[in-house]
Image: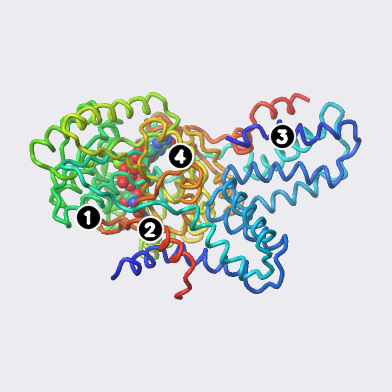
Amino acid sequence: MIFSNLAEKLQDTFDKLRGKGKLNEKDVKAALKEVKMALLEADVNYKVVKKFINKIEERAVGKEVMESLTPGQHVIKIVNEEMQELMGGSKEEIAISSEPPTIIMMAGLQGSGKTTSAGKLARKFAKDGKKPLLVAGDVYRPAAIRQLQVLGERLEIPVFSMGDDSDPVDIARGSINYAASHNCDLIILDTAGRLHIDQEMMAELEEVKAAVEPDEILLVVDAMTGQDAVNVAKNFDQRLDINGVILTKMDGDARGGAALSIKAITGKPIKFAGTGEKLADLEEFHPDRMASRILGMGDVLSLIEKA
Amino acid sequence: MGFLQRLKEGLRKTKQGFVDKVSNVFSGRTNIDDDLFEELEEVLIQADVGVKTTFALIEKLQEDVETENITEPEELMNYFQKELQTMLQNQEGGFKLDKKLNIIMVVGVNGAGKTTTIAKIAGRYKNQGKKVMLAAGDTFRAGAIEQLQIWGDRLGVNVIAQQEGSDAAAVAYDAVQSARARDVDLLIIDTAGRLHTQTNLMEELKKVKRVIDREAAEIAAGVEVLLVLDATTGQNAIAQAKLFNQAVNVDGVALTKLDGTAKGGIVIAVKNELGLPIKLIGVGEAAEDLQNFDPEEFIEALFSSDQ
Ligand SMILES: Nc1nc2c(ncn2[C@@H]2O[C@H](COP(=O)(O)OP(=O)(O)OP(=O)(O)O)[C@@H](O)[C@H]2O)c(=O)[nH]1
Ligand SMILES: Nc1nc2c(ncn2[C@@H]2O[C@H](COP(=O)(O)OP(=O)(O)OP(=O)(O)O)[C@@H](O)[C@H]2O)c(=O)[nH]1
Ligand SMILES: [Mg+2]
Ligand SMILES: [Mg+2]
């Protein structure tokens, strides 16, 4: 990766400027050019990058440089702080309804990881002492129901299905009765993958939402997503008012700039990270780690934190 | 619907954004200045063309302005189209299938669209009167075998499969033997999705490829490796292409999900940086949503304004 050593690059840019007391506009601009490239390389949306860079510039120009830091490190420090703020700080939990069942609905593009993440959530909640029910709401994709059933068997968690001739709205409704009669207090609704511009399919999700009023709607997004992440997130959020995001396939080497874009565009928190294909591979999302990952410089950040 | 028409239809969404934006950059201004290049940068990056390729393109254009004495923005737009064409030239869409037995092994990261693309290719050649067979080489993901079998049933194509969890190389071996025994023209082998960074899974893929190569050599069959890339993917597609190519020598790329708003600019980066030809594009979830990639028509479809 070309920009994996952004920190070194910044160090270089600033080596000549050591000993200067204040960050002047020209120096900051030079440093921010590298930051901009790093963010773009990480797939952060172009518009989000532009706004972000402007904000940093405003904050950085004219600042006294801390003694313990080089000017480059100082800029990184500011970048890091802004990044943390954008990504959101505190841990975000799933809202458990005081009146069971709690209903969680998955949504997202084709192949993003909805069905797998539904299984992972079911496992997590079962471990927490809940009695989850998985609901096979994808009646389109070949063997989507079977896929969920296999996951259910592995987890020993019930799967509610009405086959693939039924309407997803009826399936969602039906699952509530089923949950009640089987003592399940948490429903996880799998849905078919769909494009955010597919009006009919998006309307279907709205109908499911209206029918069962989920406590949580989670948008499942692939960490490898490029610039289009903002369009996807914006559309799903506008139509469904999502509660949060699951960022999947974080076990790869994608820098995951989509996370920053989605947060910046929707303001909705990223609640979980998918870190593998196995059902145990679901983690809490750590905004701070994500910030370093997007910038591609874990070590220097810890260095700065110590200073 | 003719080919071009279908391509245009499929790429309508892609084009709308791209064409409008590109012509906005060049027309309606009198000078070629920094603003123009910055706007072009924005358009290219937002189309996921990739940071490196974007800057290479812009540098080339800036050179053109100098050496060719270009003063009119509209004239520069022609150069821009030509540069894009140059980057995408020298590739042929589709497959030749000129051997007695032709084998296509399909690889790619999780959820990219491998299995669906296999169904689409099978449907196309079945319609052309070829005897097609599929091999369920994804023995790992829940419901993967059933997914391929459902496609096989729909298309009236034989599917060679073993139990979930069995050795993928053994499935491939079986499949080549049966294909040979049954006088099949085209055998398409599915593989489990895997991230290019998972070394053990990449080793497994190499093993599958070795088995296919060995069996194929004995009967002088043709083997091609098709890498499936999701158009929604950002810069990570380049790393995917690089590492899959290193592991199993990719012969061509299928770019899926171009029916969304993702611009698919990564095609340009993959072709330009790695020289891998783009053979097919996926423009939907149905069996017929497959097109040959044709650079001329692709770019024409991107730029023609038939709205
Ligand atoms: N490496 C990795 N793979 C994942 C992760 N989450 C899901 N996958 C894989 O991604 C692929 C797609 O996952 P699915 O759960 O089927 O995705 P989906 O969104 O339900 O797909 P559709 O129903 O077709 O829209 C599968 O191969 C999964 O095993 C993850 O966090 N890491
Ligand atoms: N809109 C659209 N969806 C597609 C296209 N190609 C595949 N899909 C969908 O993407 C999802 C994943 O496709 P699969 O073919 O299962 O992908 P895969 O690469 O085999 O996935 P794994 O085996 O889990 O790694 C499914 O919901 C497909 O219907 C396409 O060109 N356009
Ligand atoms: Mg699914
Ligand atoms: Mg598959």
Q: CB of residue at label 3: within 8 Å of ligand 1?
A: no
Question: Which mark is on residue B294?
Answer: 2
How far apart are labels 1 and 3 at the CA level? 50 Å
Question: Mark 3: which amino acid?
Answer: Lys
In the foreground, A116 or B146: B146
Question: Mark 4: which amino acid?
Answer: Thr
Question: Mark 1: which amino acid?
Answer: Arg
Q: Are marks 2 and 3 in contact (CB under 8 Å)?
A: no
Q: Residue A92: x, y in percent?
A: 55, 40
Labels 4 and 3 share a subunit: yes
Q: CB of residue at label 4: within 8 Å of ligand 1?
A: yes
- Pointer 4 residue: A248
Q: Secondary structure at mark 1?
A: helix
Answer left or right for A215 relative to B280.
right
- Pointer 3 residue: A9
| Image quadrant containing the C terminus of chain A | top right
Q: Secondary structure at mark 3?
A: helix
Front: mark 2 or 4: 2
